[in-house]
Image (tube, rainbow, N blue to C red):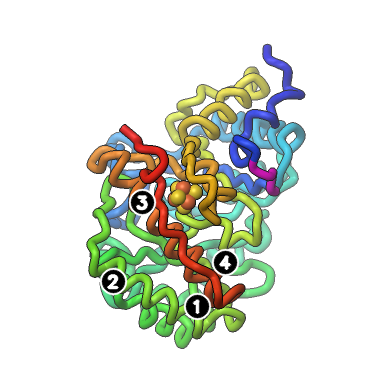
Amino acid sequence: MEDILTINDRLPGSRYGREERKRLFTASVEVTGRCNATCSYCHFFATRDRKKVAYDIPFSQFDAYMHFLRYWKEKIEGELSYRFSGGEALVMGDRLFDYSNHGYKITGIKPFILSVGKSLDQKWVDKAKVNSVSHVFVSVENPINPDKGAPDPKKIIEKIRRLHNEDLPIIAGVCVVPNSNFKDLLFICDWFYENLGYIPAIAEVNYDVYQPIKEFEWTALESNLEAVYKKYYGITQLNLFHSVSPELNYRGSDPYIFSLDLENSYKITIDNYYEKIFDVVENLSGRNYPSLQCENTNCDWWEFCDNTKWYWQGDHNNAKSLKLNDYCRFKRMLNDTFYKLIVDPEHKNNELGIFDCSPVV
Ligand code: SF4
């Protein structure tokens, strides 16, 4: 077995002479393949047949995952949290709490839950409060162009407001904004701020359903980003497109997510979880967050371009060169806009892109 002492050297984030920043790891534990929503952009069901995965994680597999996470917490430098995802964890009913209590007992960390919010009610919240659940992130649609398979954002916002409490925070999670609604970003942020008192994390539509961004959408995005930063920076939290520029949204730390999936792709068991840590780290570094190798070291944002989330380096429908071009332009737009407005009005935009120095085939 490889030396466990060297495993931290293989983590992403500090390659090619970049500084090492604090790593925030989130394990996405897929506890079920069942879901009561049908969002068109869902990554989980994009690669799975709903009928074939309409089951919950076996308890023995979950137990092995929790021992794996406890070992990860001991050996890997950085902060660890884990979430229950899928699928929609709440469809498991009270059995979900057997899992949350067990997870807390083994790891010493309470899980948080990702939910579409359909099954959330006061009764569930009261139970979750006393069953080792840390908090709930509820995905919420944008109010202008909500996905047809997702719950009505007005109803979800009303639930979040009503059910949120100090013991079990119920928080609006991610709001997906399609490219065609970049022109509405300020309106969307206004709507959330007025109705919720804060703005949820805003994300683009990505993975295999990514659509290349058109020229007029870039223009609309830039002016809306400026308007949002001007209006809301320092007023409320802003987490804009964190898959592109996590450095703007996690106070200089680097967030990394890895999946412990329903199918147990790593084949983690109670007998081998300590060996499997090498496979997971290898995958995290090589596949989940592949290195970028941009040679444009004069770019102000090179320090933050060690790697990207895997889907920015091509997907089943979009070529690597196209997505990396968009990623690079997106990142420069986000970071240059932020820097100019918040840090230094004299800041000049970075003109060079990734392919000016490092063509990708
Ligand atoms: S040119 Fe693009 S890819 Fe390269 S460091 Fe700058 S933002 Fe990153």
Most extreme residue toward the bottom is 194
User: Which one is closest to the eye, mark 4 or mark 3?
Assistant: 3
Residue underneath mark 3 = 35
Provide the major secondary structure of the magenta segment. Answer: loop
**In terms of sequence position, does the residue under pointer 3 or pointer 1 come before the other?**
3
Residue underneath mark 4 = 125
Residue type at tag 3? Cys
User: Which one is closest to the eye, mark 3 or mark 1?
Assistant: 1
Residue underneath mark 1 = 229
Residue underneath mark 2 = 181
User: Which one is closest to the eye, mark 2 or mark 1?
Assistant: 1
**In terms of sequence position, does the residue under pointer 2 or pointer 3 come before the other?**
3
| Mark 4 to mark 3 CA distance (whole Å) | 19 Å
The answer as to whether callout 4 falls within 8 Å of ligand 1 is no
Local SS, label 3: loop
User: Which one is closest to the eye, mark 2 or mark 3?
Assistant: 2
Within 10 Å of the Cα at label 2, are there few (<14), some (14-19), or many (20+) other Cα atoms?
some
Identify the residue at image location x=44%, y=66%.
202
Relative depth, front residue between 245 and 64: 245
| Mark 1 to mark 4 CA distance (whole Å) | 34 Å
Is the residue 231 above or below the residue 95 in the image? below
Within 10 Å of the Cα at label 4, are there few (<14), some (14-19), or many (20+) other Cα atoms?
many
